[in-house]
């Protein structure tokens, strides 16, 4: 994958912001997780309702089990606290074991629990959940973004997500000096996702 230049990144996230001025779902999701932090049942409700909306294409076939999501959050709260306080620029290979564990745990917790596609798992929903829980550390992806980065998740999704994190760290390191130029208050990873979405998911740039 070709790492985008600073100008390409800026053009991408500015086009996203031009077309998606409100970005309402992301704001609501971030607020709910922060508001209910430390209360796994409420975190699961807030996170879950938003994932059902964001990933309606998958979950229209059946929902995941909210109790399983709550249990996953409860059992991993100490790790989630750790990564919520960190930035992707602090990533090192020493984190790989933790990240793989969290990815696999949430991948299982968010699988469809009923209906015709019971047992179906979504690496996309998993990345969204992890990002909302630790928004400065875990990046977002979707099918088109993962393919563009050479990290498609059809096979060994946790390992592919680690590769994706390493690539996003490279981009974040390049983007960081530009942060003072704009005052959106957004994280490095949110701006990278806006670029990725504009370029790879929608083809706007």
Image (cartoon, helix red, strand yellow):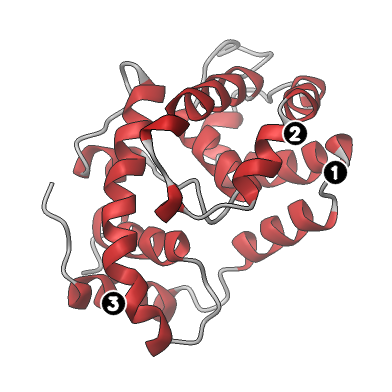
Any part of residue 15 in sight: no
Q: Nearer the viewer, residue 205 or 126?
A: 126
Labels 3 and 1: the sequence-earlier one: 3
In x, y percent, where is residue 189?
44, 59
Any part of residue 75 in sight: yes
Q: Tag 3's secondary structure?
A: helix
Judge left or right: residue 103 versus residue 201. right
| Residue under pointer 1 | 38
Q: Estimate the spatial distance between the alpha carbons at disc 3 and disc 2, rounded to whole Å.
A: 35 Å
Q: Quadrant of the C terminus?
A: bottom left
> Disc 3 or disc 1, which is closer to the eye?
1
In x, y percent, where is residue 109?
66, 21
In x, y percent, where is residue 204?
25, 68
Tell me: residue 192, above or below residue 109. below
Q: Residue visible at 43% across and 77% down?
A: 17
Q: Tag 1's secondary structure?
A: loop
Quadrant of residue 142 within the rendered picture? top left
> Disc 3 or disc 2, which is closer to the eye?
2
Contact flag, marks 2 and 1 (Cβ < 8 Å): yes
Callout count = 3
Crowding near pointer 1: few (<14 within 10 Å), some, many (20+)?
some
| Residue under pointer 3 | 10
Q: Estimate the spatial distance between the alpha carbons at disc 3 and disc 1, rounded to whole Å.
A: 35 Å
Q: Nearer the viewer, residue 148 or 201?
A: 148
Tell me: residue 58, above or below residue 105. below
| Residue under pointer 2 | 77
Judge left or right: residue 179 versus residue 131. left
Q: Tag 2's secondary structure?
A: helix
Quadrant of residue 102 within the rendered picture? top right
Labels 2 and 1: the sequence-earlier one: 1
């Amino acid at each position: 994958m070709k790492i985008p230049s600073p100008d390409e990144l800026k053009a991408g996230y500015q086009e996203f912001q031009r077309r998606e001025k409100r970005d309402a779902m992301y704001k609501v999701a971030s607020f709910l997780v922060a508001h209910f932090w430390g209360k796994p049942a409420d975190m699961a409700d807030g996170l879950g309702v938003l994932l059902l909306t964001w990933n309606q294409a998958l979950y229209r076939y059946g929902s995941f089990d909210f109790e399983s999501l709550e249990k996953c959050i409860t059992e991993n709260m100490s790790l989630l606290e750790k990564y919520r306080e960190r930035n992707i620029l602090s990533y090192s290979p020493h984190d790989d074991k933790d990240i793989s564990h969290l990815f696999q745990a949430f991948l299982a917790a968010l699988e469809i629990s009923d209906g015709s596609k019971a047992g179906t798992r979504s690496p996309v929903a998993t990345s969204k959940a992890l990002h909302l829980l630790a928004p400065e550390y875990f990046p977002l992806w979707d099918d088109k973004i993962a393919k563009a980065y050479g990290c498609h998740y059809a096979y060994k999704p946790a390992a592919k997500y680690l590769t994706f994190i390493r690539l996003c760290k490279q981009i974040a390191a390049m983007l960081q000096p530009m942060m003072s130029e704009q005052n959106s208050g957004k994280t490095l990873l949110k701006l990278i996702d806006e670029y990725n979405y504009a370029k790879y998911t929608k083809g706007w740039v």
